[in-house]
Image (cartoon, rainbow, N blue to C red):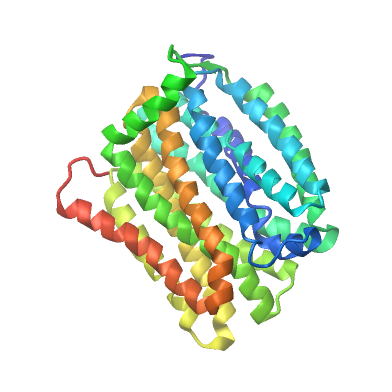
Amino acid sequence: MTATTHTMTRGMVLLFAFCCGAIVANIYYAQPIIGLIAPDIGLSDTMASFIVSLTQIGYALGLFFLVPLGDLLENRRLMIITTVVAIASLLAAAFTDQPNVFLLISLLVGFSSVSVQILIPLAAHLAPEESRGRVVGGIMGGLLLGILLARPVSSVVADHLGWRAMFMIAAALMAAISVVLALTVPKRKPDHSATYGQLIGSLWTLLRQQPVLRQRAFYQGCMFATFSLFWTAVPLELARNHGLSQSEIAIFALVGAIGAIAAPISGRLADAGHTRIASLLAMIFASLSFLPAFIHPAYSVIGLAVTGVVLDFCVQMNMVLGQRAVYSLDAKSRGRLNALYMTSIFIGGAFGSSVASAVYEHGGWLWIVIVGSVFPLLALLRFLSVAQRGSLATA
């Protein structure tokens, strides 16, 4: 690898965290306002959640086909190009009136928002081994805060300026981010001499050869499925059965942002060698997080808020722990390892969000509770199965 000499100072960590949060927010702005977007563009209620799932599918495709280029091409230029495409797709989303076109644009918004997953491995390359968990955890804290704040920001903007304004504002922010990336991110040209086809082909080899990657991808895919299911369905529940406005839903979503504190905590736990026990606790509490839904109806909104905070904390903690474990496998393949790990996560997220509307329409919040509890239980059962076999590869 050739790169301008840099160390990951606190200022750079904060800058990387801000950029990651701002970029990844693009794929979550639509989540709390699909109830406004769908009727305006002529999309049915049962199809509304496909806005969210197609955005996440686009992100997964970008992770699989674009992020591996971080092991081949100069990283800063690659990030700027994808950010420019994001600007164009966000502007297109703001001005289209056609439902099918909007769904295709949603796919492109997700596809072009993957530069964060090039930036994070770059930070891991620049950070020394003894502080890599802390650095990645700090940047992931910014990314996860972007995910969590995107929902309340989107709700407030849509409530006061209309949903189209949110996409216009996002495009303007991406324009500013592209300038920041150009001026501040160090250049990094990997040493790989492989072709793009060989690079993509090597993904299957990495997946086959790295059991930790397979395990971590499954755990977090299940966790993110329940995360996406909850946050796609809960705005519908709050609006229909609790009478909350978009601004009030924004306040509710803001409470969930508390869960972002899990990222730096989990980074330090990973550096201290506590990855396995922290992962176990995250899966257990995620499985139990929907129980507050059964408290007295008069306090049900509080119960939903507790579910959101606990679930967010557990999902974010397990994500950073997994990322730290995956980054430790092979320094030369971090871009591709990250691509495989994050692709699996967002496939899980896309599945969770795609079934959210249908599950909610069919069985109400009770069915969301049941389905949402199943995903982390599957991760927990797999984790315990691997641990029982005493796999030395487990992390």
> Which quarter of the picture shows residue 301?
bottom right
Residue farthest left in this picture: 389
Residue at image position (52%, 42%) is: 60
- Answer left or right for 291 relative to 240: left
Q: Could you tell me residue 137's position as x and y percent?
A: 46, 42
Residue 113 appears in the figure: yes
Q: Could you tell me residue 259's position as x and y percent?
A: 51, 58
Residue 169 appears in the figure: no
Q: Could you tell me residue 373's position as x and y percent?
A: 41, 68
Residue at image position (56%, 83%) is: 299
Residue at image position (40%, 26%) is: 201
Name the quadrant of the N terminus.
Answer: top left
- Answer left or right for 120 relative to 255: left
Residue farthest front in this picture: 100
Name the quadrant of the C terminus.
Answer: top left
> Which quarter of the picture shows residue 212?
top left
Foreground of the two, 154 or 349: 349
Foreground of the two, 262 or 21: 21
Foreground of the two, 237 or 317: 237
